[in-house]
Image (tube, grey):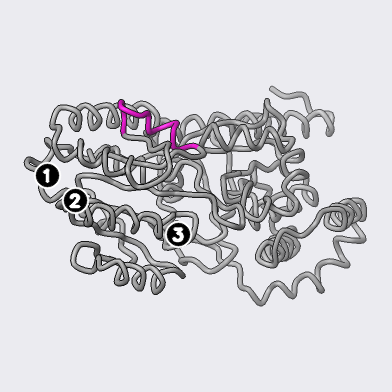
Amino acid sequence: MSRVTVDRPRVATLFTTFPLLSETFAQREVRALRALGVELTLYSLWRGGRSFEGLPVHRFAPWRVAALLWFLPYWLARRPGVFLDLARRLAGTKMPSWLNAGETLLGLAFALSHAGRFARERPDLIHAAWATAPGTAAELLSALTGIPFAMGAHAYDVFRDGGDWLLPGKLRAAALVVTSSEATRRALLARGAPPKRTVLVRRGLDTLPTMGPPRRPRDPLRLLAVGRLVEKKGYFEQLEVHAALAAAGFAFEARIAGGGPLESALKRRAAELELSSCVTFLGPLSHAEVRAQYAWADVLLFTGRVARNGDRDGLPNVILEAMAHGVVVVAREGAGVAEAVVDGRTGVLITAPGTEPWLAALGRLQRDDRFTEELRAGARAWVAAHHDARRNAAQLLAHFTTVAKTSVASEARQSDVVPA
């Protein structure tokens, strides 16, 4: 007999990889939802850990992509219309990239191999953390089992290589689409996402760290960047800013935390610009090690840009973390960055090309204690108001509960059960 009320929905959450060092926001969301009493079952489609803070993580073995051959005939016979629609969508839309094709295949294989399990266990909601492989899996699982699905859709899903292969159909089918910046929400609406089912739920921080006074004097000025060494982070442009500072005789120390495919090329470029004595590449760091870097830094530099494949950041979590720690953010304008970095109030927003605006901003932050303190206080207040993990998780839970209750009521009507 179907339940007719759902106060704390049972949610099956699908991730591409979980837990992942570069996705601390996902871990905070899981932690906050569990604290609210949500019964979560975690699935990681591509590797990941075996558990997270005592909760099992069900990892999908890559060899089970072969499940397409075993389970496809079974489900094709039971739900032919689902696969006819899927075939039409795949054939009618240009494949964005081989990477996205692989993500799509992974999602389909997961759904086909797990549909029986989901049909037996019947969680109240399937939630895909991303619209790529997890979103593909969630949509097909929903179509095969009748369980509603919610889906996170972020900058990677929308912009990289023109967006996910099956994104428009997922946006129409999802009972709920969640994104973390207003800029990405507008982009989703332009792609056909239903406005009433597309909601902004910002990412959150577990706690606000202790914030002392700004360092005095800030000579040399301590500059920090945190993020994967990939094209969209704009690190080559950041090295040009460092070179301009050095050429101007500006006293600074810079650290870049993160690993990635551009590491060797960036180190070579830093050597060519004779920056080895003032720019240090730290490599990938743990959460605790990153927090130690925030304690060291005066300024976080964010030089994000649109990569050649269209990929870009929305509102990077590192900006919010730096603001919470009292590190002044100097960032290039783009996507959702301006939602948090309000020029002259919560940080400095660079809107003009070239290195001169960066030098002017950093020079003022080195000299002007009052301005620096005003920015730190404004940034801290903005994060406290918008990025509390518990408050934002409660908002997400309210959306989940609405979807689950609507689904239960619909099932009850179909089975002639009158909801209590």
Residue 114 seen anywhere in this rendered image of the structure = no
Is 29 above or below relative to 293?
Answer: above
Q: Is residue 339 magenta?
A: yes
Q: Nearer the viewer, residue 11 or 280?
A: 280
Residue 231 horizontal/vertical position (percent): 49, 59
Amino acid marked by disc 3: Pro
Where on the picture, by quarter, is residue 415?
A: top right
Q: CA distance from mark 3 to mark 1?
A: 37 Å
Q: CA distance from mark 3 to mark 2?
A: 31 Å
Question: Mark on residue 218?
Answer: 1
The reply, left or right, for residue 133 in relation to residue 383 is right
Residue in the picture at 38% in, 66% down: 259
**Which residues make up the magenta segment?**
336-347
Amino acid marked by disc 1: Arg
Where on the picture, by quarter, is residue 146?
A: top right
Image quadrant where one finds the N terminus: top right
| Disc 3 versus disc 1: nearer the observer | 1
Q: Earlier in the sequence, mark 3 or mark 2?
A: 3
Please, what secondary structure does the residue beneath circle 2 have? strand
Is the Cβ of the residue at disc 1 closer than 8 Å to that at disc 2? yes
Residue 191 seen anywhere in this rendered image of the structure = yes
Q: Earlier in the sequence, mark 3 or mark 1?
A: 3
Is 362 above or below relative to 283?
Answer: above
Q: Nearer the viewer, residue 74 or 270?
A: 270
Which residue is under mark 2? 222
Residue in the picture at 25% in, 59% down: 255
